[in-house]
Image (tube, rainbow, N blue to C red):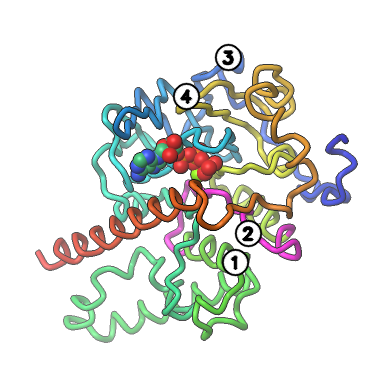
Amino acid sequence: MSSENQPVSPAAPTGGRQKATGLAKGAAVPGVAKVDPILVVDGVERRFGGLTAVNVEHLEIPRGAITALIGPNGAGKTTLFNLLCGFDRPNTGTWQYDGKNLAGIPSFKVARMGQVRTFQLTKALSLLTVLENMKLGSSDQPGEKFWQSLFPAIWRKKEAEIEQKARELLTLFKLDAKEQDFAAALSGGQRKLLEMARALMSDPQLVMLDEPMAGVNPALTQSLLDHILGLKDRGMTVLFVEHDMHMVRHIADWVVVMAEGRVVAEGPPETVMEDPAVVDAYLGAHQDVDLGAVTGRIVIPAGSDADLAAARIREKIEAEAEAELEAEEEEEKK
Ligand SMILES: Nc1ncnc2c1ncn2[C@@H]1O[C@H](COP(=O)(O)OP(=O)(O)OP(=O)(O)O)[C@@H](O)[C@H]1O
Ligand SMILES: [Mg+2]
């Protein structure tokens, strides 16, 4: 079945937008230089015991475009995201965001610098309301108590601005009616939307989305696609991980393929996804499952190895996020 026959692509899901072209400086081979890279990765390796989860020699992400990072389960996509955003540390390697070295910079600072990410397993804080979750996404939020005590008037003004921005974004993402609901009461898809909306609170330049479509109800997928395309319209760069090849073909300007920790191919979707090596290594097994399955997401059976691994990773990320919040508070006190 060809992707053109798929139901989710009525009159261009891209809203008639043009794909960005001419992004690379040379032939589309792994590690090719980009005309205007926003992110440049060099020699990044992450090992877990005997397993090399990530081993990226060189990778450049083009600015102002939508890049999809694809590859089979366990290829190292999420691990690479964690490294690039400061949620994990590599054994070796360097990387620059917008020309600035990011190695060793903690995640909250990375986010303030304009590079934000969402999680494969959503991290909305269940016992906070939707609006409170949004306010936490603001880069102005840290330091709240300090400023409040010194200049209550200024802080109230800032607080009002943050709330207004949060409400505008919630309206954009059609979550405004839910602002006082606990995040726990949202559906999986609404949490994904909340996570994306929250990421935008800090006015990012580079938005990294780990499986934005996973677990999203069919009724919300089109709106999520529109939101991702909307980020590019507003001048942001998007890097997203996705198993859904239909979505990748339709919205990505550039595709990077990972397998066993390495970048094995990259290029525009129409060429890279026809590459026999890519089809063999990855798409062959997933083609039938994924084509036309923008909505039918991979379900991880409860208690399976993948489920347990996911739980472990989630625990680790949460522990690290907590440690970072504490570190941040310590720093603010100084
Ligand atoms: N904290 C960890 N400890 C040990 N091994 C890990 C850890 N995190 C990831 N791994 C392993 O590293 C490899 C890469 O995992 P990663 O989650 O990055 O893959 P992925 O490409 O995101 O896969 P998926 O498509 O299933 O999300 C896997 O073999 C995984 O089991
Ligand atoms: Mg992953």
Give the SS element for disc 4.
strand
Q: Amino acid at mark 1?
A: Gly
Q: Amino acid at mark 3?
A: Gly
Q: Which residue is mark 1?
A: 188
Residue 300 vertical placement versus 185 (above, below): above
Q: Is residue 322 magenta?
A: no
Q: Which residue is mark 3?
A: 26
Q: Which residue is mark 4?
A: 262
Q: Amino acid at mark 2?
A: Gly
Tag 2–tag 1 contact (CB < 8 Å): yes
Give the SS element for disc 1.
helix
- Alpha carbon distance from label 1 to label 3: 41 Å
Q: Which residue is mark 2?
A: 215
Give the SS element for disc 2.
loop
Front position in the image: 186 or 132: 186
Give the x, y percent position of residue 190. 61, 69
User: Start and end of the magenta stretch?
Assistant: 200-222
Local packing at callout 4 (Cα closer than 10 Å; few below 14, some 14-19, many 20+) is many
Residue pictured at 68% horizontal, 43% vertical: 244
Q: Is residue 215 magenta?
A: yes
Query: For this view, does 246 lie left or right of residue 242?
Result: right
Q: Amino acid at mark 4?
A: Arg
Residue pictured at 21% horizontal, 76% vertical: 147
- The image quadrant of residue 83 is top left
- Alpha carbon distance from label 2 to label 4: 27 Å
